[in-house]
Amino acid sequence: MWSILPILLLFVLGFLLQKSTMFTEASLAGIKKVVSTLALPALLFQAFSSLEIEKRYLLLVVAMFLVCLFMVLLGKALAKPLKLVSPYFPLLMGGFEMGMLGYALFLSVYGSENLGKMALVDLGQVLFVFFVLMALLIRERDGITSPKVLLRQFLTSPVIVAIFAGIVVSLIGKAIPPSPFWTAIGESIALLANLTVPLIAISIGYGIHIKRAGLALSVKTILFRKIVLFVLALAINYFIVDGLLNMDSIYRYAVLVMFLTPPPFVITIYMRQGDKANADYVDNTLSLDTLFSILLVMIATSLYV
């Protein structure tokens, strides 16, 4: 629990900076740009370059993808019974905010030496977010889904480029002879990656804004998502991670951390302009869920063995 305290304090610092003139919305956007195009890709490259790839692990990748898909379908089926009629409720069910939060929380507890384990657990949901969730978001916003647009965004995303570059290095890295040049490149990437956690923590803390209007709907959404995903995390760990694959215990912890994170923040980027009611609902849900996630990870990592 105490290992996450520095992250929590940085979130609090970011939140307190809302009252200062040090940051503006423009400077915050600049920080997020640095994170999304440089620091986070460097961290993900590190994570996926240390990936332990075995054919049998593909079962876990597929399972993560299917869980995300199941959650969206479950959200569609239960939206009316739960009286959560926003078109974004099902979309808030699928996917996890790993890049801007999950990796920071995992690193703070389990250390950078286990990044490759987290990367393996994360891979299936990354594919879901870029190929399914983004398509659903664009269709909701524009009424159409363009495969060309999705493919272009996928191939040009710094995050995706870093992930695939990392996977390539994990496959062929041992065949590359060591040299001062590659050592310098690796150290530069490590320096960039080290910026990720503090910048993310401060920027997310600064960006937390919870409004009273529609707060009850956001709380209901979060509780439903957390309960279902917690049960699914325990089931996947029992039947797949421990049962079928007999994987190291760190993978169980990685699954639990991921399933406790909020929905992907990318949802806010692809919403319709001027849709204030749904925008407030989504922003409230993501902000409040971020706080819940930090607290739940602190508790879960202390108790779950």
Image (cartoon, grey):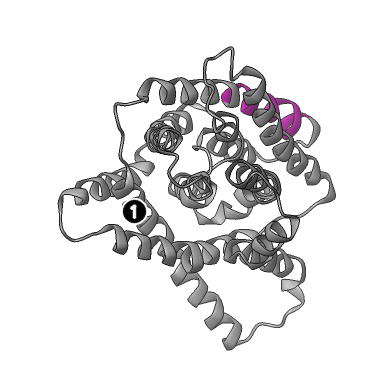
> Could you say where residue 186 lies in the image, as x and y percent from the top left?
55, 75
User: Range of the magenta residues?
Assistant: 230-243
Name of the residue lying farthest toward the top: 81
State the residue at coordinates (75%, 55%).
Answer: 147
Q: With respect to residue 284, does 186 lie above or below?
A: below
- Tell me the quarter of the picture where residue 215 sits: top left
Residue type, mark 1 in image: Ser
Q: Is residue 194 left or right of residue 90?
A: left
State the residue at coordinates (26%, 44%).
Answer: 12
Q: Secondary structure at mark 1?
A: helix
> Could you say where residue 54 lies in the image, as x and y percent from the top left?
80, 52
Q: With respect to residue 163, does 208 lie above or below?
A: above
Residue identified by numbered label 1: 203
Q: Is residue 275 left or right of residue 246?
A: left
Q: Is residue 156 left or right of residue 9?
A: right
Q: Is residue 233 magenta?
A: yes
Name of the residue lying farthest toward the bottom: 180
